[in-house]
């Protein structure tokens, strides 16, 4: 049972995909939102949910607002999907990692080309 929190994280991710697409009616959460990762504490009391919004900056802001507002409701729905003694407290975080990696790669490419131009 050492890796139970990893299995629970995957169950939460799968359940949230269904909950977001079929059960949550908050207008701020109606865009195309995906749960990219779930991290659950070893004691199963807290879950950090990373989500991605496929849209412009305004949709990211709306999703953040929607998750803040619907967190308790989503947790109560999640209880119906999970067979756990306790349903973890949920913390939603925007997942900007792909954009950050892309920006870093662009910077590195510019540095490489800039350095190459100085030293023929």
Image (spheres, rainbow, N blue to C red):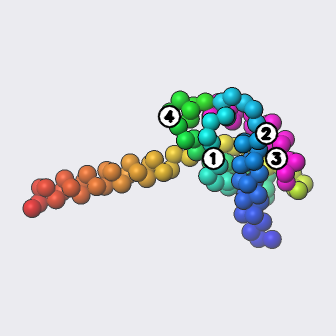
Q: Residue furthest left?
A: 120
* N-term-proximal mark, 4 vs 2: 2
| 28, 21: nearer the viewer | 21
| Whole-number angstrom distance, CA of label 2 to CA of label 1 | 14 Å
**Residue 2 colored magenta?**
no
The residue identified by callout 4 is 56
In which quarter of the view is residue 109 placed? bottom left
Q: Position of residue 75 (x, y in %)?
A: 80, 42
- At horizontal 55% and vertical 41% (from top left) the residue drawn is 54
Depth-wise, is mark 1 or mark 3 nearer the camera? 1
- At horizontal 61% and vertical 40% (from top left) the residue drawn is 32
* N-term-proximal mark, 1 vs 4: 1
Q: Are marks 3 and 4 in contact (CB under 8 Å)?
A: no
The residue identified by callout 1 is 34
The residue identified by callout 2 is 23
**Residue 68 colored magenta?**
yes
Q: Are marks 1 and 4 in contact (CB under 8 Å)?
A: no
| Whole-number angstrom distance, CA of label 3 to CA of label 4 | 28 Å
* N-term-proximal mark, 2 vs 1: 2
Q: Are marks 4 and 2 in contact (CB under 8 Å)?
A: no
């Amino acid at each position: 049972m050492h890796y139970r929190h990893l299995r629970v994280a995957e169950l939460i991710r799968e359940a949230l995909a269904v909950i977001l697409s079929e059960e949550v009616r908050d207008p701020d959460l109606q865009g195309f939102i995906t749960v990219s990762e779930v991290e659950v504490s070893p004691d199963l009391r807290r879950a950090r949910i990373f989500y991605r919004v496929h849209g412009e900056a305004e949709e990211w802001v709306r999703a953040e607002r929607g998750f803040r507002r619907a967190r308790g409701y989503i947790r109560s729905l999640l209880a119906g999907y999970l067979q756990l003694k306790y349903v973890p407290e949920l913390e939603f975080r925007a997942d900007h990692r792909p954009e950050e990696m892309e920006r870093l790669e662009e910077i590195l490419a510019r540095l490489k080309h800039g350095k190459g131009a100085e030293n023929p």
